[in-house]
Image: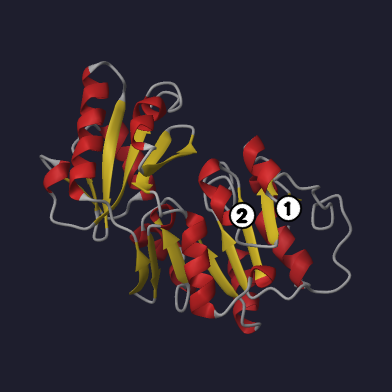
Amino acid sequence: MPYSHSPLPTASGPAATAPVDIRLVVTDMDGTLLDDDKRAPDGLWEVLDRLRERGVHFSPASGRQYATLAREFAPAAQGMAFIAENGTYVVRDGVELSSDTLDRAVVTEIVDEVRRLAAGGVDVGAVVCGKRAAYVERTDEAFLAEVRRYYVEHRTVDDVTAVGDDVLKVALHDFGPVERATAPAMERFSGTHQVVVSGEHWVDVMNRTANKGAAVRRLQRELGVTPAQTLVFGDYLNDLEMLDTAEWSFAMANAHPEVVRRARHLAPSNNDDGVLRTITRLLGLTAPDA
């Protein structure tokens, strides 16, 4: 249901009169924590230090793979739970907390559909996302450059359906608008699986039980944290279920309209350091330098 968004923690609203009892902060990466140039906000590491001092858990939740997230947060990775691959893989200190893997036959069906789309002129490629690495068949530099942005551990293989790894999801990158051809083609899997548009050029296919929200709920149980103690930030459709796990759910000012309707509150945009500004207001931290 849509909420009447509170102006309390936004750039134009007043600061909270007292710190909120938050024990878990979960944030999407692209379009949320990171700005449009994929840069982390100034002051991030200082805020993470302050959260750690207070016993507040911080968890990135992304379509990116675990290896990529662990590298990006290396200075603060100890004790941090990473919600990777759109919730299909949750890892803390190198130990798997949960995973939700695809049946091999379904992976083959998805890849075959992508191959048909490509043969028909759609500029699309599949990334088969395993626990150990991401696997691709396309070898052109334009496609590999997109893969490298999100998958540190990636391998080029002759046949992505034959890899010896547990498959968490299949991510498809379309150089055109993904909702024009590729996402509609994947709809035939939506009766049994999650088909999620995770960006202008990306769509992910996962098990029906897999999403960021399910991963956050498992993490809440692991940590003994309630929805009232959870603060969540998101901007795109793959964040919808995650917003439902927290009483303190925030859509970014730049978010997809459906995300804005689903969230309880609004945060400043990703280009205005909305995540850090909201955290510092709600928890009464010293604001990071502008």
**Residue name at image x 27 percent, y 37 percent:** 126
Number of numbered tags placed on the structure image: 2
Q: Could you say whether the residue bearing mark 1 is in a helix, strand or loop?
A: loop
Q: Amino acid at mark 2?
A: Leu
- Residue 289 at least partly seen: no
Measure the alpha-carbon separation of dots 2 and 1: 8 Å
The answer to whether the residue labelled 2 contacts the one labelled 1, judged by CB atoms less than 8 Å apart, is yes
- Residue 209 at least partly seen: yes
Check the picture and name the quadrant holding the N terminus.
top right
Which image quadrant for residue 122? top left
Residue 264's label in the rendered image is: 1
Which image quadrant for residue 146? top left
Q: Amino acid at mark 1?
A: Arg
Residue 166's label in the rendered image is: none
Which residue in the structure is indicated by mark 2?
243
Please provide percent x and percent y for residue 2. 72, 44
**Residue name at image x 69 percent, y 42 percent:** 260
